[in-house]
Amino acid sequence: MDLAAAARVLAGGGLVCVATESTYGLAADLRRPEALARLSAVKRARPGDAPFAVIAPDEAAARALARVWPAAAGELAARHWPGPLTLVVPARADLPPAVVGPGGGVGVRVSSHPLAAGLARALGAPITATSANRSGAPPATTAAEARAALGDEIDLYLDGGRCAGMPSTVVEITAEGALRAIRQGAIALAPR
């Protein structure tokens, strides 16, 4: 896989379908508003749909997306990153609306999949990590399923074989450090 070529597609405003530790995801460069608008159109996202989750190249890049990084976020990241744990933390004010939820949080993780992680590192910036499907349809676990669903609307498909299919666990962390499980997934977290 030529991750440098895929990163150039993203930097040019394109969309890349990439294997992650859970399902195939659709990557766009957060710095490209036209790519985020195109991603919304491909997903057929409607107002009120969940914001796009983000894969950061590393924890420092994840922290940079947050207005505040609570100690609880650092503790969970240290235990479970890279891996299928998405932390919803208070978003920086200048992040694109497509990645900020109604409560003002951004969902970010550091991927343990070599393609997703490698693509974010090759771009040198966070990428979207929304599932490779139309809104409401099942997520793709193979590149062939993603291509059948999305076709030529995606500029490049990075085939990483079959994905596990188990979604990431999503935990919201408030500025004060309170935790709320949004979705149980691949990582089982004990209640605090």
Image (cartoon, helix red, strand yellow):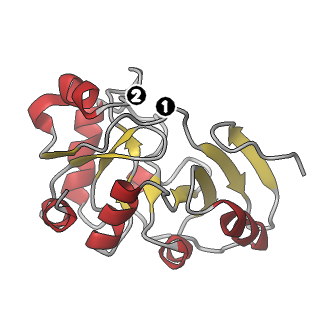
Q: Earlier in the sequence, mark 2 or mark 1?
A: 2
Residue under numbered circle 2: 139
Q: Residues within 10 Å of mark 2 (few under 14, many from 20)?
A: many
The amino acid type of the residue labelled 2 equals Pro
* 17 vs 64, nearest the viewer: 17
Residue under numbered circle 1: 165
Q: Secondary structure at mark 1?
A: loop
Residue displayed at 50% across by 70% down:
93
Q: Quadrant of the N terminus?
A: bottom left
Q: Residues within 10 Å of mark 1 (few under 14, many from 20)?
A: some
In the picture, the disc for residue 60 is none
Q: Where is residue 103 shown, x and y percent of the image? A: 62, 51
- Is 84 left or right of 160, judged from the image as shown? right
Cα distance in 3D space between marks 2 and 1: 8 Å
Q: Where is residue 175 shown, x and y percent of the image? A: 73, 67
Q: Is residue 176 visible?
A: yes
Q: Nearer the viewer, mark 2 or mark 1?
A: 1
Residue displayed at 51% across by 77% down:
64
* 107 vs 92, nearest the viewer: 107
Residue displayed at 56% across by 75% down:
63
Q: Where is residue 85 shown, x and y percent of the image? A: 61, 52
The amino acid type of the residue labelled 1 equals Gly
Q: Are marks 2 and 1 in contact (CB under 8 Å)?
A: yes
- Residue 8 location, quadrant: bottom left
Q: Where is residue 82 shown, x and y percent of the image? A: 55, 62
Q: Secondary structure at mark 2?
A: loop
- Is 30 left or right of 37, judged from the image as shown? right
Direction right: furthest residue: 192
Residue displayed at 40% across by 49% down:
129
